[in-house]
Amino acid sequence: MAREPHLPLPGLAALVLLALARAASGSTALQALTSPLGPVVNLGFAAFAGNDTSPAGQPHSSVTFFGNIPYAQPPVGNLRFRAPRPLDETIRDPSRVPISDARDWGAPCIQQPAQVGIGSEDCLKLNIWKPSSASGSSKLPVIVYFHGGGFFAGSPLGFPFFDWLSQNQGIVAVSVAYRLNLLGFLGGAAVAADGDLNAGLRDQRAALEWVQRNIHRFGGDPDEVTIAGESAGAASVVMQMVAFGGSKPPVFKRAIVQSIGFGPTPTSEEVEDTFKNVSAVVGCSGRDVMRCLRNASIGAIVSAINHASVPPVVEGPGGFLPDLPSHLIASGRFNSVGLIGGHCTNDGRTFVGGTPAQFNSEGDIRILLFPRYSGVSAATIQRAFELYPAPDAAGSPFKTQYERASQMAQDIVLGCMDLQLVQALTSRGVDNVFAFRWNSPHAVLFEETPFEGVMHTSDLYFLFDGTVRLPNALNSFKAFNESEARLSQEAIGFWTSFISSGNPSTENVPARINWAPFSSNSSSNTTVAAHSRIVLERGSDGGTQTNTVIESIPEVEFERCKFWMSTDVTAETRV
C-alpha cells in the first residue's frame, strides 16, 4: 500500500498522492485472516479483530464493531502540539500481518476538567461499525461522526451506532476521537513557528483521509462519505467544510450539522494571553518554550488544562481555518456538499446564562447573556432588543424576558448558522439541502429543568438510544417509552437515508412523510411556501405515529438571522 504523505503539501500534490494511495490499496489482494477473538478485517499493514452483535429480536441485523483503531501516530513527546503524523501503512509481508484486539473502545482524549489517569494523550483512534455481512467489495455509504463537547470534553463513547446499522444494513459508521482543549487547540505565534495550529481539526482531517484509504476493507465506499456532528461536533463539520477557505476539494460528499455550537473564537490578543497563561502554569518560558511544553509531564499539562479553555483559532491566510467560519461562508470560501442542517427549538436556553427568575428586565439580559460575547457593541445589543420586542410590546412573541433572551442566545450561532449554510448552498445550486427543527425534549433533562423545553442535545437523546450524560466519557442510558422509540426510529431513518442516497426520505421506512428540500415548495402530505423544514416531534403514547410535520420557516427567522450572520455582527460575536 502506498504510504500517505505527510501534510501540508501543495494541495494538488497531496490530493494526487492520496489518490495513488487509494488506488494502490484497492488493487492489493489480501488474504482472509481468522482469530478466536472475532471477525477480522485485514488492511495489509495491520489487521483488527472485532466484536459481532446481533440486536435482540433482529438476528438478520448483525453488526460488527471495531474499536481503538489508530489513524495517526500517537501525538506525544515531540509530536505534541503538532499536526497528526501518518502511520506507516506499507504492506511488507502479506503473509504475516499482526492482528490487534479491536473489540473495545479506545481511551478518550484528555477532558476538561482534567485528571491524571482519566483519558489519554495517545488518543488518535477511531471506531467502526459495519454490517457483519459486508465485505471489501460491498461499497456501502459511510458516516463519519465528530462528537460535541465544546472542544474541551466529550468522547465517541457516548455515541454508539448499533441502532443505526441494525435499522439500516446499508451503511458503515465511523466515530473519531480528536485532541481537545490546549492539546488540540493551543495557539499563538510560538505554536505557529514550532508546531501546528488547530491540531484537533487536523486530527479530524487525518481521520477522514484514513477513511479514504482504508474504509473499503470494512465494506465502505470512500466516494460516499457523510460527516456529521452536534454542537461542537457540528462546528467541526462546518470547519471541515470551510477548511483552507474551500481551496482544496473535500474528502467527503455530504454533511449533517445539528445545533452548530462554538464561539466566540478568540482574538489574536486573547490567543497570546492564553499561551502565556498556559506556559506559566506548566512552568515554561524563554526561547525554548515549545520544547519545554513538549517535555512537560502530563500532570503539568493537566493542571494547565484546568486553568484554560482553548477553542479553535483563526489562523489567517493559508491556514486550515483562515477566517471566522461565518465569514468564509458569507464570502463563498467553502466546499459545496449535500447538507442536513438544523437545531433544537430551545437550544438557547442551555446557554442564556440564567434561570427564568433571573430575567426581569433588559438590564438582566445585558448582565447575564452578553458577557459571553464580550466583543458585542452597544449598538448591536440595542439593535437586538429592537429585533426581539419586549414582552410588553404590542405583537411581541415573547411572554417573558427569559424567552426573549434565550431566543437571542440561540440565534447568535446555534439557530442561525445552519440557516446561513442552507441558504449559501442552495444559492450555489446544491439541490439536496434539507433543514430541520427538533421539537421533542431530552426526557431526562426535561425532568430536571422543565423550563428549558426542547433544550440543547434533545436530538442526541433520540438518535443515540437514550444517552443521558457524558462526563469524562462515561455515559448512562434510559430506556425509551413507546412514543420516544417511534421518533427515534423515524429520525434514524431520515439520517441514514440521507447518508445512503443524499435524500432523507428515499430509504426511510415507513415513509409517512416526505422531507422536502429547503428550496422545495411541496411535500407528499401538504403544500408549503418555499424554504421549508421538517419539524421532528414525538406523538402520544398509544398512538401509531409521530407528530412530525413540514413547516414554512417564518420570515422573522430570516430577518433575525440576516442580522446575526452579517459580517459586521459576526466580527463582534466571532462565530
Image: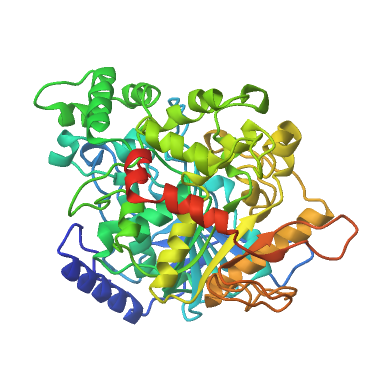
Q: Position of residue 505 (x, y in %)?
A: 63, 75
Residue 329 visible in image: yes
Q: Is residue 26 above or below residue 321?
A: below
Name the colouring of the figure: rainbow
Task: Tell me if 189 is positioned left or right of 387 in this view.
Answer: left
How many marks can you see? 0
The quarter of the displayed image where residue 197 is located? top left
Residue 475, image quadrant: top right
Name the side, left or right, on which 166 lies relative to 64. right
- In the image: residue 526, left or right of residue 101: right
Residue at far right of view: 542
Name the outermost residue toward the left: 287
Measuring from the top left, give residue 357's x and y in whole percent.
67, 23
Nearest the eye: 540 or 552: 552
Residue at 36% x, 26% y: name it: 308
Residue 115: image location, x then y, percent: 45, 25
- Residue pictured at 18% horizontal, 57% vertical: 8
Residues 88 and 296: in front is 296
Against 422, residue 373 (above or below) is above
Front residue of 87/552: it is 552
Up/down of 22 relative to 276, above or below: below
| Quadrant holding the N terminus | bottom left
Residue 203 visible here: no
Q: Quadrant of the C terminus?
A: top left
Quadrant of the rendered image containing residue 492: bottom right
Rendered view: 271 above or below 542: above
Instruction: Estimate the x, y position of residue 572 in percent, counting from the top left.
Output: 34, 39
